[in-house]
Amino acid sequence: MQDDSTGRGSIQASTLESVSWDRMIRAVEKVRERLMRAARALDAALIPYAVVGGNAVAAHVSRVDEAAVRTTRDVDLLLRPSDLEAARVALEKVGFIHRKVAGLGMPVGMDVFLDGPTATIPDALRVVWAGEKVRPDSVLPAPDVNESEPGDGFLLVTLPALVRMKLTSFRDKDRTHLRDLLELGLIDGSWCERLPEPLDRRLRDLIDHPES
């Protein structure tokens, strides 16, 4: 492996596979299949949940402009902590394996459900605990699962709850997702009035300085 001018490793051309639409489509389908399999299992067990994260953004964006949808490999599920054991039983019946992992940029361990014994962390279901802060210094806790609505075969976090989550995390990818929602008119400056501090200021700064 050679280093490029940025100091990051680069993959040698001889190790690359040929460009393939099939692989691109398969990558998206794997994420969809993982999400839907988990949703069906939780629905069958009557366990309340909501899809959050990048897939939730994609679902809301698709209502306005399907061409603006961003794909993601992350499947993030909002669950109540009291439902962990019931969710573990339901999800293990359809091939998932519960683990608590350290790292991933998180100050504490994260609960995940690996998609089989040989699966890697990036291909797991990632659990966000309803009513709890994702990080100790988070401004707000995650919403409850009752802030959800029916999606296409799964329960989807509502747009207001999703916006609060994105403004609370406010990482680079969260700001990108919020810009998408702003550009499509799903949210606008009037939303600042319904947000607590400092989320209102974060949204206003993003509106006033979208490239910052």
Image (spheres, helix red, strand yellow):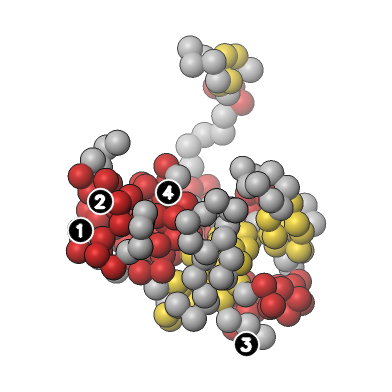
Helix, strand or loop for disc 2? helix
Q: Nearer the viewer, residue 48 or 204?
A: 204
Q: Identify the residue at image location x=61%, y=26%.
A: 15
Q: Closer to us: mark 2 or mark 3? A: 2
Looking at the image, tell me whether mark 2 or mark 1 is earlier in sequence order. 1
Amino acid found under the numbered disc labelled 3? Leu
Q: Nearer the viewer, residue 106 or 92?
A: 106
Amino acid found under the numbered disc labelled 1? Gly
Amino acid found under the numbered disc labelled 4? Phe
Q: Which residue is mark 4?
A: 170
Q: Disc 2 to disc 1, how far (Cα)?
A: 7 Å
Q: Which residue is mark 1?
A: 189
Q: Closer to us: mark 3 or mark 4? A: 4
**How many circles with numbers are drawn on the protein?**
4
Amino acid found under the numbered disc labelled 2? Arg
For residue 130, what is the image quadrant?
bottom right
Q: Which residue is mark 2?
A: 204
Helix, strand or loop for disc 1? helix
Classify 25 as above or below 92: above
Helix, strand or loop for disc 3? loop
Residues at marks 2 and 3 touching, judged by CB atoms closer than 8 Å: no
Q: Disc 2 to disc 3, how far (Cα)?
A: 39 Å
Q: Disc 3 to disc 1, how far (Cα)?
A: 38 Å
Q: Position of residue 107 (x, y in %)?
A: 65, 46
Residues at marks 2 and 1 touching, judged by CB atoms closer than 8 Å: yes
Q: Which residue is mark 3?
A: 46
Label 4: few (<14), some (14–19) or many (≥20) C-alpha neighbours in 10 Å: some
**In the drawing, does residue 209 fall left or right of residue 6?**
left
Q: Identify the residue at image location x=74%, y=68%.
A: 95
